[in-house]
Amino acid sequence: DVKVTQSSRYLVKRTGEKVFLECVQDMDHENMFWYRQDPGLGLRLIYFSYDVKMKEKGDIPEGYSVSREKKERFSLILESASTNQTSMYLCASRPPGPNEQYFGPGTRLTVT
Amino acid sequence: TQLLEQSPQFLSIQEGENLTVYCNSSSVFSSLQWYRQEPGEGPVLLVTVVTGGEVKKLKRLTFQFGDARKDSSLHITAAQPGDTGLYLCAATRLTSGGSYIPTFGRGTSLIVHP
């Protein structure tokens, strides 16, 4: 069974804190993605990575950065969390090409 | 502008009713996926459609890809409470840099009442 895991299901942080969200996949997929999901807005792509140490901006990268030091791990970093970053964060992985993605269970982040 | 337009956004029906969810675009796609997401979980793939005009069935769910590969529909027959969830269509666009970027519709939230 394929598996994508995320480090936390729920997280509460204060404004200005640095936040790390981690994602690990065990499928040896090259591509990994970070989304945020908000009611009425659907899934919006923040960043993606198609190889170790490679990253590309998605549709809403502002306020976020990412790190991919190992193939199986893709981290999302909020350098200085703000209340408008309160959201559900979903990680996904995918083999090369326009194929289906496999999602983690999500991290619900609240910034107070 | 949303690349994939899903409708309706919300659907609340009684058990046993039929329903159809639509996913439309002005772009042509090589493939399109449908996902289902339950509260507090990540989306799970239901089906991928690839060929224009293709119809795929998954028990009581019927998926169709438009002839021009710009739109798709999901039809549920005799809905059950277990069908409750958020249904998402997704497709992939190719960037000028040669990367395949996934894009999602905003989703259809379905509630099936017993």
Image: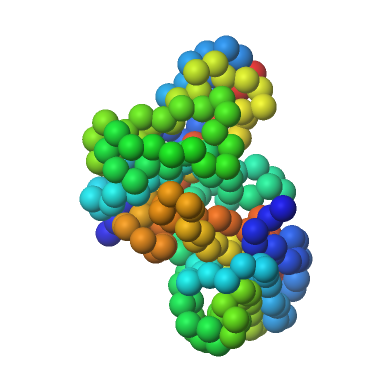
Q: Is residue B110 left or right of residue A54?
A: right
Name which quarter of the figure residue B19 lies in.
bottom right
Measured from the top left, where is residue A77 in percent x and y? 45, 25
Reply above or below: A79 against B108. above
A56 w.r.t. A27: above or below? above
Instruction: Describe residue A21's horizontal placement relative to residue B108 as left or right.
Output: left
Q: Does residue B36 appear in the picture of this structure?
A: no
Q: Position of residue B17 (x, y in %)?
A: 72, 80
Task: Give the answer, above or below, for where B47 lies relative to A99.
Answer: below
Residue that appears at 67% across and 68% down: B26
Quarter of the image for the C terminus of chain A: give it. top right
Residue B93: % across, % down: 51, 59
**Residue A1 location, quadrant:** bottom left
Closer to us: B37 or B74: B74
**Residue at the (61%, 74%) spot, across then down:** B70
Front position in the image: B2 or A10: B2
Q: Out of B64 and A97, give the one closest to the viewer.
A: A97
